[in-house]
Amino acid sequence: MLMMAGRGGATKLASSMMLVARCFSTATARGMLVKEAVHAKAMGFHGDVVRGNVGEFLARGSVFGLRHGSTASFSEKDQQQNVQPVAECGGGDKEEKETVSYWGVPPSRVTKEDGTEWKWNCFRPWETYSADLSINLTKHHAPATFLDKMAFWTVKSLRWPTDLFFQRRYGCRAMMLETVAAVPGMVGGMLLHCRSLRRFEHSGGWIKALLEEAENERMHLMTFMEVSNPRWYERALVFTVQGVFFNAYFLGYLISPKFAHRMVGYLEEEAIHSYTEFLKEVDKGNIKNVPAPAIAIDYWRLPPNSTLRDVVVAVRADEAHHRDVNHFASDIHYQGRELKEAPAPIGYH
């Protein structure tokens, strides 16, 4: 009777495995098969369906519709790797857990120069830098052609509703500005990437330069999120503005890259002006000069006692460098050349 009950249970288990094989991917089904097989062995089931060796059981899984090949090579060593307890990972105030995977991708262990553990996953120490504060903040490209004037007045028209909405709340203003400023580099880099694939040609490093700009602008946003708390309607506004601006800039770049880069150049000039006003409010005491967020100290390699003012100065310098890059890119197109013909300013923050 016990033997019959065991075979009956095994038959039900085999039926359930059919459903697993059809409803899940091979990797997911494999994990469930291991779990069910181990459970069945613990319950005392016998027969040809359930085996002590899970790899042999999976080899027979072709009856249930599973693939052959690597799926059947799930050995006892792999089982032990798959079920081992996760190890705790230090860094920060929160305890994190390492993700243990069958695919064997090792978690990275990065430390600072002083030997302490690096706690940021969004960027690494080799991506940090010291901002070049010696850059000229007053440079301006005087619009001469029709496209230049169109780009200039497009940016000026966007500034009016921004001033009206945020007024002197420069923390939230900076947050909104960065959600927009991080879009052009990503769009331009994406389009150049696709162009490079279509034409089987190099980009001259401009894909990396534009994506680097987009990442730098995103890090500005991550920094200001630490010092400002946007309201719900400001967050909703980000969805609207980003959706409209992304599609508009995408079409604009397809039609005229020289116009698109020139507009970003003027947009960065406005960013320099906004951060200069931000600094004035900090110096007047209207905005509290709080300690710099930890993410900013590590990203810009700032001294440990840095303040919000130091962060704004570094961000403003970044915007000035982005101004130069985009005006430079537009000038290349105005000269009748392609971006790939000029070396890209990689690392030029």
Image (cartoon, grey):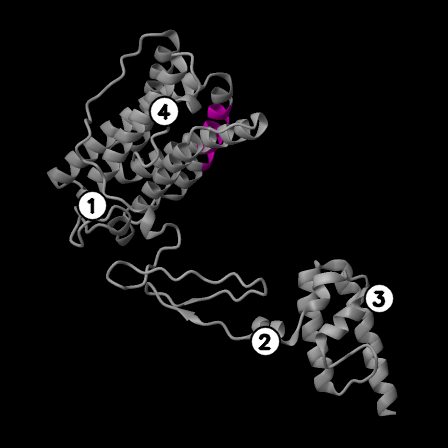
According to the picture, the residue beneath numbered tag 2 turns out to be 80
Mark carried by residue 308 = 1
Q: Classify mark 2: residues with Cα within 10 Å, few (<14), some (14-19) or many (20+).
A: few
- Tell me the residue at 42%/60% (across/down): 108
- Residue 164 in sight here: no
Q: Residue furthest bottom?
A: 1
Residue picked out by circle 3? 63
Q: Measure the alpha-carbon separation of dots 2 and 1.
A: 49 Å
CA distance for labels 3 and 2? 26 Å
Answer yes or no: is residue 298 visible: yes
Mark 2 touches mark 4? (CB < 8 Å): no
* Residues at circles 4 and 1 in contact by the CB criterion of under 8 Å: no
Which residues fall within the magenta stretch?
A: 239-250
Image x and y of residue 330, in percent: 37, 18
- On the image, the x and y values in percent for residue 107 come to 45, 62
Real-space Cα separation, disc 1 to disc 3, in angstroms: 65 Å
Which of pointers 1 and 3 indicates the residue nearer the eye?
3
- Quarter of the image containing the N terminus? bottom right
Answer few, some or many: residues within 10 Å of disc 3's Cα (few below 14, many 20 plus, some between 14 and 19): few
- Confirm whether the magenta stretch covers residue 18: no
- Sequence order check, earlier mark of 2 and 1: 2
Mark 2 or mark 4: which is in front? 2
Q: Closest to the observer: 35 or 349?
A: 349
Judge whether residue 247 is colored magenta.
Answer: yes
The residue carrying mark 4 is 264
Indicate the amino acid at tag 4.
Answer: Val
Mark 1 / mark 3, whichever is N-terminal? 3
Mark 1 burial class by Cα count in 10 Å: few <14, some 14-19, many 20+ = many
Amino acid on which disc 1 is placed: Leu
